[in-house]
Amino acid sequence: MTCSPRELTPSFRGTPPPLPPTTYRSIMSSPGPHSGSSPSSPVRPTTPQSRGSPIPPPPPPRPSSRPKLPPGKPITDLSRSFSPPVSGSPPPFAPLARAESSSSISSVTSHSAASTPTLGKDLNMPSTGCSRGPSPLTMGPQDTLPVAAAFTETINAYFKGADPSKCMVKITGEIVLSFPAGITRHFASHPTQPILTFSISNYNRLEQVLPNPQLLCCESTTNIVETKEFWVNMPNLLSHLKRVAEQKPQATYYNVDMIKYQVSAEGIQSTPLNLALSWRSDATNTDLRIDYKYNTEAMAAPVPLHNIQFLVPVDGGVAKLQAMVPPAIWNPEHRTIQWNISSLSHRSENGGVGALLGRFQMVEGPCKPSQLAVQFSSEGSTLSGCDIQLVGTGYRLSLVKKRFAAGKYLADN
């Protein structure tokens, strides 16, 4: 049975706080570019804005030199909750592979520019070196400008006992583009620039799409398509990058939020880590069992889950820990038990299937069953299967980074 994401909260034991309403964070902390900076354009999809937010300027015209793709998926059902994970920001990216000496991304969760790109070998991409400090952009007339992209997705899930039909799932994500700092000087010396256009594949997997209303344009249609094309309001982008360059003169690249989205989920089949929690308790003893299973079907490409943490509170006055299999960490002050697994994949023991067992001697039993909370992260793949391609000339895609992480990932008895 597939459940709506809106049903997630009421089913929790202990009622976690509700997810915040849908908003689109402003780029950096500065206001958006002034309206009237670009000519009129075709109608674009309506995107929700918070009350009191400035009316975005009209987008630039759609590039006429490129053939139009089939019309895209409408933005519907905007009343549904769309928000970042309640449990806090996902863990930061591991260092990125640096395919271009003038462009990389260190974290798609940051709107500000970073100052020291680092090397990474996890993407199996060639590395040509790492620069520190300002990154000049020296280009000939035939050169293209490097642009990097990053997908970050967060999965919220709730499991009830061992019944897969009661699993509820919500997946959200964002796309960030990264530009080298030298691009501002290049644009200053080349006022006429081609419009940056890109397409998102597997677009039909998305239920909601919220483009940055100040920077992105797209065609508004009611058809569902596998690929959707977006193009950038270049005057607004240049105004934004100039402001960032003035605020961060030593930065080597700038990260800019472009799109937020929600992914169509299919219950437990969409969870990369299946869970089942069970308690047995009497006046003197409590048994806890957590069954877990790595699920390759949830990912576009199977990748390991890293830094998995299983945390469970245990009340009833624990007098003695009689057994913990595998060994776990008991916190007597907070009365919690925590298991840590460094990495899990289909290549792990038993194909990533296992169990965690705890037995406690109680003073004030029986123990009241509590909720399990799990955290993990993964890089190199997404849950949506979406990808990005640049359309037209003038730019090259130097790097694409993909990751997902657990947000509110819970299980009850």
Image (cartoon, rainbow, N blue to C red):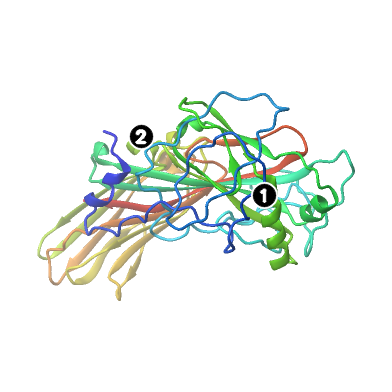
Residue corresponding to mark 2: 266
Question: What residue occupies the far bottom of the structure in this picture?
Answer: 333
Tell whether 213 sits left or right of 281: right
- In the rendering, at what x and y percent does residue 184 appear? 77, 55
Quarter occupied by the N terminus = top left
For mark 2, give the secondary structure: loop
For mark 1, give the secondary structure: loop
Q: Is residue 309 visible?
A: yes
Image point 77% across, 52% down: which residue?
183
Residue corresponding to mark 1: 37
Image point 23% across, 39% down: which residue?
163
User: What amino acid is found at the position of numbered circle 2 in the picture?
Assistant: Glu
Tell whether 351 sits left or right of 227: left
Question: What residue occupies the far right of the structure in this picture?
Answer: 140
Looking at the rendered image, the disc whose residue lies closer to the viewer, 1 or 2, is 1
- In the rendering, at what x and y percent does residue 182 appear? 79, 55
- In the rendering, at what x and y percent does residue 193 appear? 78, 42
Query: Front-most of 115 and 140?
Result: 140
Q: Are marks 1 and 2 in contact (CB under 8 Å)?
A: no
Query: Front-most of 164 and 386?
Result: 386
User: What amino acid is found at the position of numbered circle 1 in the picture?
Assistant: Ser
Image point 52% across, 55% down: which residue?
54
Query: Front-most of 392 and 339?
Result: 392
